[in-house]
Image (cartoon, grey):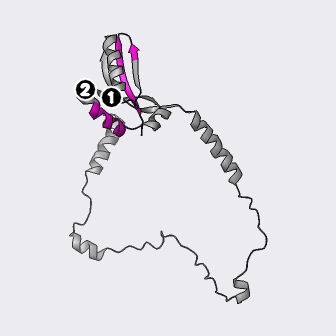
Amino acid sequence: MNRYALVMLVALLASCANKNVPQTTISSDINRFQEDLSDVRPKFAVAPSPTITEKKPEEAISTPTTIVKSSLDVTKRLETALDTISQLNKAIRYAQGYRIQIYSGSDRRKAENAKSASYQLFPKLTPYLIYNQPTYRVKAGDFLDRIEAEKYFVAFKTTYPNALVVPDKVEIRKSVSNN
C-alpha cells in the first residue's frame, strides 16, 4: 500500500472508534445543564440618566423670531428631479398590457369583417388588424391589466368563440380612456 492509502485507513479507523459520550435522558440533561455565557455577551456602558430641570414659564413658551434656513433644505432640487421624471413619463407611449384577439386566419375579408364588427360591438375599444404573413389577426382594446380585458372578453366570447386574451404592447393614453 502506498502512504496515502495508509493515512486514509488510519483516519477511517479513528472515525469509527467508540466515543465516550454519556448516554443520559433528556429530562435529566435539562435540569443539569448550566453554562456561563457572560464572557460572550456584549457589554454596554450605562448611559447617565438626564436630569429634569424645571423652566420658568416665560422660557417654556418662546416663539422663534428668525427663521433659519437649513443646509439640508432640498425642496428645489427635489421639485426639479420630480419635474424631470414627470416629463420622461409623459414621453412614454407604450407599455406591456393585454388585448383581446378575436380573429386569426389567412382570409383578409373575414379579418376586416371581424374588425368592423368589433368596432360596432364596442366603439370605445380600438380594433387593430395585424398582418404577419400569412396570418391576419384582429385584436381589440388596450388594457393595462388582465382583469379589465376579461370584462370585455366575456362579451366577445359570445360572438367570437375562438377569442383569446393575449399579452401585447398597448398604448397608454388609450388604455386610460377605456377605464
Q: Amino acid at mark 1?
A: Leu
Relative side of 105 to 179, left or right: left
Camera-side residue: 5 or 77? 77
Q: CA distance from mark 2 to mark 1?
A: 9 Å
Q: Amino acid at mark 2?
A: Thr
Residue 168 is tagged as none
Residue neighbourhood size for the residue with mark 1, other residues' Cα within 10 Å, grouped as few (<14), some (14–19), many (≥20)? few
The part of the image, by quadrant, that contains residue 118 is top left
Which part of the image, by quadrant, shows the C terminus? top left
**Considering only vertical position in the picture, is 17 above or below 40?**
above
- Secondary element at tag 1: helix
Residue that mark 1 sits on: 121
- Report if the CB atoms under discs 2 and 1 are less than 8 Å apart: yes
Task: Provide residue 50's location: percent of width, then percent of height.
Answer: 63, 82
The question of residue 142 being in magenta is answered with: yes
Task: Provide residue 168's location: percent of width, then percent of height.
Answer: 41, 28
Q: Residue at x 26, y 72 (%)?
A: 29
Q: Earlier in the sequence, mark 2 or mark 1?
A: 1
The part of the image, by quadrant, that contains residue 117 is top left
Range shown magenta: 130-155
